[in-house]
Amino acid sequence: MKEKLLKHTGKTMLSLGLVVMLLVTTLTGCSKNTTNTTAQPSPVPTQSPASSSDEVTFTAGTYSATVTGMHEMTVTVTLSETEILDIQIEHQETPGVGEPATKSIPAEILETQGLGVDLVSGATLSSNAIIKGVTDCLKQAGVSEDGINKLLAISKVVEIAEDELLTADVVVIGAGGAGMAAAVTANQAGKTVIVIEKASKMGGNTILSGGALNAVDEGSETALANKDSVENHYNQTFNGGDQAGDPVLVHKLVDNAWAGVEWLKSLGMEFYDGVFTVTGGMWPRAHKPVEPEGTGFFKTYQNYLDTHDGITMVYNTAAKDFIIEDNVVTGITCTGETGNTVTVKANNGVVLATGGFGRNVEMRMKYNEVNKKWPTLDESIPSTNTSGITGDGIIMAEAIGANLVQMENIQLLPLGDPETGSLSGNIEHAVESRIFINLEGNRFVNEGGRRDDMTLALFEQPETKMYIVMDSDTYPEGNEKNNFGESIADLVAAGRALKADSLEELATLMNVPAENLIASVEDYNRYCQGGDLEGQTDSFGRTLFTDTDGVNNGINDAPYYAAVRVPTVHHTMGGVQINEHAQVIDTNGNVISGLFAAGEVTGGIHGTNRLGGNALTDTVTFGRIAGTSASEFVRK
Ligand code: ADP
């Protein structure tokens, strides 16, 4: 076994000395963002293909297909009779989210001349869309289903690399929001850190979020203007989760929330001034990063890595088991990129930050059985989560006796893309200025209420579908971006959002009865600024009508917008029990020495229903606490 003692290098370790042998004999190459993957000289073959592309022929030419990843993209493939010569992808995938796939997937297809490419973890939507686009182009070029299957069978063969032993002061598992907050905090405390991440990049679910981060700057003008306080944040968090959260942890969360924002700002992260109400957030206290989605967090953390020594990122490596010596967690064993074993030892503590289990259908079905809150959580229900969020850390921790708490508390949002379940294409900006309309053209719930109430109500609606409806107050110029970095004009052009000059026309596009839509909007407008019921609670119990700028005068300024949405699994509130120092607690109520946890992998903070905007607060607050505790941990 090769042994490596990590110094303050600050370098990114991407590859563990892997050797790649190609299965195929030919290779060529192939981008608004355009990814250019241009033709390369063919490599010397190292092995005969089991089933090679030379059995599949094409009608030479250039073909295009339009597909949807996180966003719409156009894939253009150029073929000779025997080779895939070039793949161009015109896309708007977000840097650090779907964008990496627009480079690596075409490169691998060209390299192997096959379609059996590895999906880019954390970018599976984009990866699959590109493969679909290339497949469509090949079909246009006359390739039969049989031919496509042959090409799908062609993939890289990877030789297993040597096993490795890595050591650092603090070991962090998972490079999402909580893991990176812990890693940076530990490093600021003077520790060397290794971050083990099973995906090929940092970000996890956090980077896919809308970026809303709840925090109250007690006594500030903003907080005073919104009649908000840390105590109000506490009460809404605790009561919003039916008082099932641990009061000590809830206090930690809200009491340290603003300090977390200041810490992020000290690292260079930028936020817009003011606050807004995120869906299910119940109150205007969400801070919005300047960068789209959750990308601002990771731009900030990456910048820290680039300017400081001592944090080593190990990607494509999945933690499997904890190492326990004398009842202390001293490290982890992992499976490396090539299937080799990577052993990682900690001089101080280990931080578990692997996120929840929203993409583990078996687990979410099993735990939904406990209280049967949701009609079903089988594979028919999509998820906003990235593919690697499969409960690994929860399973690992349970195996060493960690206490799992409130696993049945699973959060769904009523805001999923009908194709993918992702939050992309969600056109709302703030709660106050939009309504939800079912396929009968009617409102059906308090759209300013709890996430679980809204989603349960959506399950009761025809086809379990609804439209988000708003007017030009949200998009005055018609080309502004939503919270996910997508311009409303592009969403309309792609058919993912509907735009109309009148409510009648919008109803036609939505295929709902116009009289119902108009009556629903008129009723809502009565409660907005200037309406005859302004300031009152409507028949659904809604109180949030006027945003902090006081500009929402209802849905009455053309053009009008709508976008269809479905229920989607978003956050798992159950997980590993921790105390206020982020120490993991075992089933006997004792601390598991050496092990700390933060973020969605933990349970018992949010109770039955997490307040919108509190997940990012959780990652920063408890990530920092875990980073500090793990740094201070000394083996006796
Ligand atoms: P949180 O919001 O709690 O930080 P995220 O979903 O943002 O959670 O991040 C969790 C990260 O942990 C993801 O990047 C995911 O790929 C990673 N991860 C999950 N399981 C493992 C594992 N077994 N080994 C290493 N990393 C993992």
Image: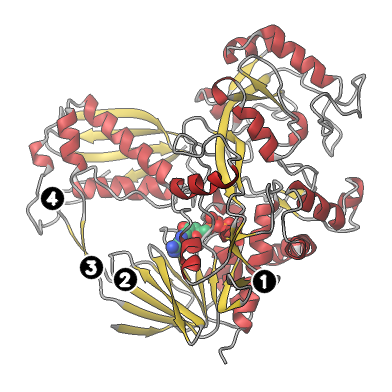
Q: Amino acid at mark 3?
A: Ile
**Element class at badge 3:** loop
Query: Is 398 situated above or below 281?
Result: below
Q: Residues within 10 Å of mark 4 (few under 14, many from 20)?
A: many
Measure how far apart labels 2 and 1 are at the Cα level. Answer: 31 Å
- Determine which quarter of the picture holds residue 412: top right
Q: Residue at x 38, y 70 (%)?
A: 334
Measure how far apart labels 1 and 4 are at the Cα level. Answer: 50 Å
Check disc 4 and report the residue beneath it.
Answer: 24
Label 4 vs label 3, nearer the camera: 3
**Element class at badge 4:** loop
Q: Is residue 387 left or right of residue 60?
A: right
3 and 2 marks in contact (CB < 8 Å): no
Label 3 vs label 2, nearer the camera: 3
2 and 1 marks in contact (CB < 8 Å): no
Say whether disc 2 or disc 1 marks the residue closer to the N-terminus.
2
- Between 462 and 406, which is closer to the camera in this rendering? 406
Q: Where residue 431 sits: x, y (%)?
A: 74, 35
Q: Residues within 10 Å of mark 3 (few under 14, many from 20)?
A: some
- Determine which quarter of the picture holds residue 249: bottom right
Q: Where residue 567 sits: x, y (%)?
A: 57, 34
Query: Is 254 situated above or below 331?
Result: above
Q: Where residue 543 sits: x, y (%)?
A: 84, 33
Say whether disc 1 or disc 3 marks the residue closer to the N-terminus.
3
Q: Where residue 437 sits: x, y (%)?
A: 67, 21
Check disc 3 and report the residue beneath it.
Answer: 160
Q: Amino acid at mark 4?
A: Val
Label 1 vs label 4, nearer the camera: 1
Measure how far apart labels 1 and 3 are at the Cα level. Answer: 37 Å
- Between 583 and 151, which is closer to the camera in this rendering? 583
Check disc 2 and report the residue beneath it.
Answer: 16
Measure how far apart labels 2 and 4 are at the Cα level. Answer: 23 Å
